Amino acid sequence: MQGYSPHKNGDPLIPGTWIPINEPTVFVGLGWDFTGKETFDLDASITGVDEKYNLVEAVYYNNKKGMKNSVIHFGDNLTGEGEGDDEVIQVILNKVPQDVHYLAVTINSYSKNSLIKAKSAYIRVYTNNYEIGRYTLTRTKDCIGLLLGVFQREPTQNIWYFRCMADPLSGNVVIHCYEEILTLLGDYSMSKTGANNYVQHPLPGEPVFDIGKWQKVENRFTYIGLGWDIQQGFNFDLDASILTFDNMNNLQEIVFHRNLHSYNNSIIHYGDNKTGLGEGDDEVLSVDFANIPPNVFSMAVIINSFKGNSLTGIMDAFIRLFDQNKLIGVHVLSNCPEGTGLLLGLFRKEEKTGIWYFCPLKEIVTGIEAPQSVNDVGYYLGQNPLKI
């Protein structure tokens, strides 16, 4: 099976890896701690979905038994099962109705406090006798819900598999997250063969940038599209960012998923390509070169693997530039090196003329978020002066 790797009981759960569940009854324990003094009310849930991604039933605080009593929610760990768990749900897999193909495990912040303040949050799967495995989140995103894992039935042999994940949800109650859950299940299914709207670059006639070579960029409004193909079975959350620097390579600003535009809106991050700009791009940013602050002389485009997965699971990553009228150019990486961050390109301004130039790169940077990559990016700025 693609994405499957040998797993011994008690091993850490690896995001994106399917592991077989050989026990008829398992427990899902979820736990978390919080920073600050806010009061949180988190709710764990399991949602049953059929093979065609139709909702069957959700088991949560307002419906504690469901799917013919095969899924039971114990509330705030009132049974004492799973010491240290904040909430526990029991799943009797051999009694789950045959029309249920997926069981999605989620948590939601009922009071709408951001889960970014959670620390050491985890999901673990265990039986009455041993722990199958657990996954601890080093950090969560600014969201009020998370899809933490999914069980999937392999119908021909009637075997269940489990994989952990950590995907943000926008609802404070599971019933407000159904559409997002169904979309994510479609993306992560064992039977999925590839991204539905992935576009192979370079396109016919698309100009190709040479790595390490500087090329003039017209000082106009330009889009930056970044894309990647994920190897089957891997579970990534990749974030694109632009970091700006002055002429002494001092950081000025970071535009990334926590700060979607620069202070004067000359740089904009469009999130997960929800605008529809740039068909085939996974994330899109724009730069209005005419309005970049005069103290900015360099801009770095990077991607980071927020879940900490190595970028070796990415195939055919690319960075391309385009405007409203034409494709300017693209650089394609046939493979990605080991690491959690990648510097894909630099923009630098020629001081005398004010003309901007672009140079595609392929340099590993540390960190799962852009702020953690600043020092490495600064180093590469020093190693890649503008040569025209």
Image (tube, grey):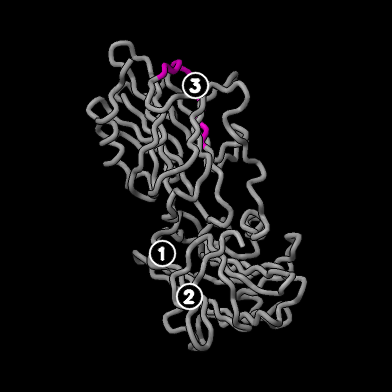
Mark 2 is on which residue type?
Answer: Lys
Q: Looking at this view, is 108 or 238 the one in front?
A: 238
The answer to whether any part of residue 51 appears in the image is yes
Q: Nearer the viewer, residue 6 or 191?
A: 6
Q: Nearer the viewer, mark 1 or mark 2?
A: 2
Dot 1 or dot 2: first in sequence order is 2
In the rendered structure, which amino acid carries the disc numbered 1? Ala
- Per the image, the residue denoted by label 3 is 221
Residue 350 position in % (x across, y down):
31, 16
Residue 281 position in % (x across, y down)? 57, 36
CA separation, marks 1 and 3? 39 Å
Q: Are marks 1 and 3 in contact (CB under 8 Å)?
A: no
**Residue shown at the point (53%, 56%) measured from the top left:** 235
Of residues 185 and 158, the one drawn nearer to the viewer in this rendering: 158
Q: Horizontal and vertical percent for residue 355?
A: 37, 15
In the picture, measured across the screen, residue 239 lies left or right of residue 36, that is right
Neighbourhood count class around disc 3 (C-alpha, 10 Å): few under 14, some 14–19, many 20 upward: some
User: At 37% from the left edge and 44% from the top edge, which residue is drawn?
Assistant: 370
Label 1 close to label 2 by CB (< 8 Å): no
**Residue 86 magenta:** no
Which residue in the structure is indicated by mark 2?
Answer: 8
Does 371 appear above or below 93? Answer: above
Mark 1, other Cα within 10 Å: few <14 / some 14–19 / many ≥20: many
Quadrant of residue 357 in the image?
top left
Relative placement, left or right, of 245 versus 358 is: left
User: Label 3 to label 2, Cα distance in Å?
Assistant: 53 Å
Helix, strand, or loop for circle 1?
A: strand
